[in-house]
Image: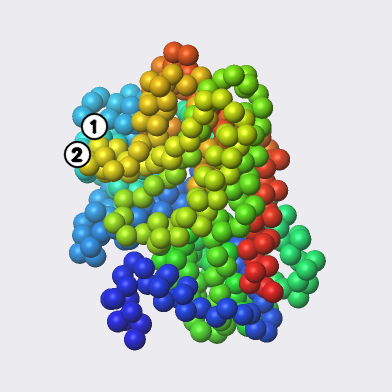
Amino acid sequence: MEFFDRLRYGKQYGYEVLFKNQPQKVTGKVGVIIAESGLPEVYEFEFYANFMEHVFHYTLPPFLVPIILANRGKGLIDPDNPLAREEFKPKQLVDALGSTTNQAGRPYVECPVKWMPPGVKKNPWDHGYFLYLGDGKSGAPDVCDKVGAKIVGWYYGKLIPEKKVAWRSQLRKVSDEAVEVLSERYPAAEFRNAFYMYPETMRSATDELLAAGCETIVYQGLNCPLYTDFEDYGHALTMLHKYVGGRAQVIMADQLGNQSAMPAAYFAILRDQLAELPKEASVRVILSRHGHPFKKETQDERAHLYRAPLEKGVREILVARGGKGDLIWSFDEYADEYWDPKNTKLDTKDAYAEGIKAGYDFIIELPTDFPAENTDLMIFHAMKKFTPFPDYDHNAPVPYPDWEKPLVRKFHAGKTTGIYAGCPVGPYRQYMVQALVASLTEKLG
């Protein structure tokens, strides 16, 4: 029966079968797994390799996966020219582990290497890399090597002064503060953390809960206010069912965006930003989303549960403020000419450009899909969407020394000031904690 269900529902199997048909009441001793992707503070190639392999296994036909994920040698990047699409003479080369030398200690730049052009030439954001064969296979697919080398050599090597990102630390604080509250309400419950891009942590958390005698395991994801097939229903949930193996019932607590406290975090951020502006200033608010390339994604079906109250609340704040103001939704990814040739989605870059052209004094962006800063927000999405501002430089470092404050970034174009307002950390974390407590309370009773 499972075979036919998977055949029928495809990538929606996790949502349509496991989530929709799950038990609604806990029984016996309860264990809770609070999970997120696991992006580490300091660079770990394992995370990016796991993530990229999941991308290709999820998106490609099975017969193409071994071809795309071939491991022939070591993929290398020049940190001074990481986005190169044409062959050039590198000044330095770095591998996915951050080394600039081969196993014998010789600089890669002095070794024979082969230029590998972009795998998808029509995609302007794909780039080439150099392939080194002298040490044999690296142990990871070449395409993962090139991504890892770019991130360790360019992101962590040049753009992130602290050599750390806030994601895992901030989400752990949300979890810890919520568990402190929940443990008082449910003293018999067991709580564990896991990272679904590190499957061994999911297995370990599951084994520990089963060993503790848990008859129900409740799963809560806090990677994003909205669950996706790509990461939550179709990856983490199916993984958990596999590891539990019928030894306990599995219940997935719903997405945090369903809780009223989640949009309230962004209301608080917006109010604080508006309080610093002249009352007569005109303001555009951009509610940016990550975006996805899939024709069918369960996230789209259920997004209104979070986004409709969020939009309503932001509009009410703008009306109460008075003066000229508007709100617009945008996508950081998959809304450019390559991914969206029919222009059915508004790119965040274009949302900024339109606001500049319209003469708004301020444009405030709220990144509504992200509970904390990560390398995508700080660098990859930034170098796509901030280009309408002449003072944005994608090669400039992005300092973020205090993770208890949102990373606020300001840029200028003519009379317009763009304000990237950051994520709900520090004083705004309380709203995420409230959402997490409320979501798990719905399941724990």
Relative to 303, residue 410 above or below: above
Residue denoted by label 2: 121
Residue 392 lies in quadrant: top left
Q: Amino acid at mark 1?
A: Arg
Answer yes or no: is residue 365 visible.
yes
Q: Tally the numbered discs.
A: 2
Residue denoted by label 1: 85
What residue is drawn where x is 23% and y is 62%?
61
SS for dot 1: loop
The N terminus lies in quadrant = bottom left
Q: Nearer the viewer, mark 2 or mark 1?
A: 2
Q: Amino acid at mark 2?
A: Lys
Of residues 111 and 78, the one drawn nearer to the viewer in this rendering: 78
Answer yes or no: is residue 37 visible.
no
67 sits left or right of 203 in the view:
left
Residue 27 in the image: x percent, y percent?
Answer: 65, 83
What residue is drawn where x is 29% and y is 76%?
8
Q: Residues within 10 Å of mark 1 (few under 14, many from 20)?
A: some
Of residues 403 and 280, the one drawn nearer to the viewer in this rendering: 280
Evaluate if marks 2 and 1 touch, with contact meaning CB atoms under 8 Å apart.
yes
Residue 444 in the image: x percent, y percent?
Answer: 67, 73
Residue 258 in the image: x percent, y percent?
Answer: 56, 59
Residue 41 lies in quadrant: top right
The C terminus lies in quadrant = bottom right
What residue is drawn where x is 29% and y is 48%?
142
